């Protein structure tokens, strides 16, 4: 099992101190020996994906993911994968050129391709499935890895993943998860397909307070109302309960897959802490999840 740490690029107006804070957080988790790579999202201004929750901080421009990746590599020796919104490119060739440039000038070989935030908008660039095929055929990246996003609760997600895998995706990262059921159902459906994705990174998000949870709801993360109520019933216990729920969901998912004797897709972890979650807490969670993955199966 591999563990990836998500590191959000700092807002540019916050200056050098914000960058140093990101680097320090990655360095401290890396020092504990718990991460294999860093996952850097590309943040754009976009509308709410849900009628729940709220975003209290306005959008502000951030450091480009590939710039942060180079800094982390140069200073810490850590490799990064970067998320990239492909539909914003002016053309298919512009996307190919950007990826080749990112490899040749930044040394990045792993990309998570992301689509547009608005269904009603006609974007100039290719969609994710088309982008995966283009890069698999035309990029000059050595040992290219192409990731796509997986939303377990979305209708026909297994069919979408099969098409994206056929087009060139060789791993997926999920939307943030807090429950096991939608993902285990997806695994069961995937098991009937001839072409399985080699690996899926499951995204888990420790949170500090109720405000963090409302932001996740604003992003469109699927969290049942009863679970939201339990997580936020006691302000002081929100972090503890979010960690407890993450461990519970991961344990059920691992047990489900093992009980059925499945080795593919490989299940890995993407830790995406929100709010002032300490590196020590993140490292401890990574160790706990690795331990649960290694433990003998005890049933679902």
Image (spheres, rainbow, N blue to C red):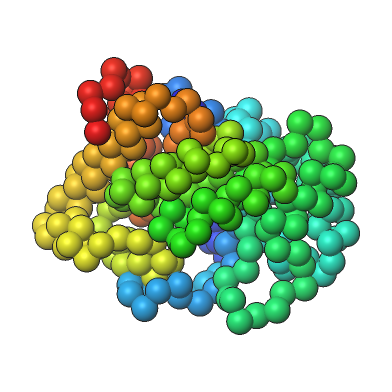
Can you tell which quarter of the image residue 10 is in? bottom right
187 or 78: which is nearer to us? 187
Residue 146 visible to the viewer: yes
Residue 141, x across and y down, in percent:
82, 38
Q: Is residue 55 above or below residue 278?
A: below
214 or 209: which is nearer to us? 214
Can you tell which quarter of the image residue 188 is in? top left
Residue 263, x across and y down, in percent:
47, 25
22 or 171: which is nearer to us? 171
Q: Is residue 286 above or below residue 33?
A: below
Residue 81 visible to the viewer: no
Can you tell which quarter of the image residue 197 is in? top right
Given the current orientation, which residue lies at the most extreme left position?
A: 234
Residue shown at 44%/36% (left/top)? 269
Residue shown at 36%/29% (left/top)? 260
Residue shown at 20%/58% (left/top)? 227
Residue 151, x across and y down, in percent:
47, 56
Q: Is residue 150 above or below residue 143?
A: below
81 or 293: which is nearer to us? 293
Q: Taking 107 as reference, is 36 left or right?
A: left
Residue 226, x across and y down, in percent:
17, 62
Q: Quadrant of the C terminus?
A: top left
Residue shown at 75%/55% (left/top)? 131
Q: Is residue 10 above or below residue 103?
A: below
How many marks on residues?
0
């Amino acid at each position: 099992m591999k563990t990836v740490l998500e590191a959000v690029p700092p807002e540019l107006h916050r200056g050098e101190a914000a960058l140093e804070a990101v680097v320090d957080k990655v360095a401290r988790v890396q020092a504990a020996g718990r991460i294999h790579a860093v996952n850097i999202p590309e943040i754009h201004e976009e509308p709410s994906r849900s009628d729940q929750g709220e975003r209290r901080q306005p959008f502000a421009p951030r450091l480009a993911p590939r710039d942060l990746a180079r800094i982390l590599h140069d200073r810490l020796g850590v490799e990064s994968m970067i998320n990239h919104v492909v539909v914003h490119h002016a053309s298919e060739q512009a996307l190919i050129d950007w990826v080749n440039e990112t490899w040749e000038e930044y040394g990045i070989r792993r990309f998570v391709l992301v689509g547009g935030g608005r269904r009603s908008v006609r974007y100039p660039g290719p969609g994710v499935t088309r982008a995966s095929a283009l890069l698999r055929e035309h990029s000059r990246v050595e040992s290219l890895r192409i990731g796509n996003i997986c939303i377990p609760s979305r209708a026909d997600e297994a069919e979408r993943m099969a098409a994206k895998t056929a087009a060139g995706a060789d791993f997926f990262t999920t939307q943030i998860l807090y429950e096991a059921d939608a993902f285990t159902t997806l695994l069961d459906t995937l098991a009937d397909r001839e072409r399985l994705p080699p690996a899926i990174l499951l995204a888990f998000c420790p949170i500090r307070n109720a405000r963090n949870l409302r932001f996740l709801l604003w992003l469109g993360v699927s969290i049942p109302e009863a679970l939201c109520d339990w997580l936020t019933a006691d302000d002081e216990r929100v972090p503890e309960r979010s960690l407890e729920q993450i461990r519970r969901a991961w344990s059920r998912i691992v047990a489900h897959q093992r009980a059925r004797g499945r080795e593919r897709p490989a299940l890995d972890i993407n830790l995406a802490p929100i709010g002032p979650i300490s590196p020590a807490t993140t490292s401890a969670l990574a160790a706990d999840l690795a331990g649960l993955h290694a433990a003998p199966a005890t049933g679902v």
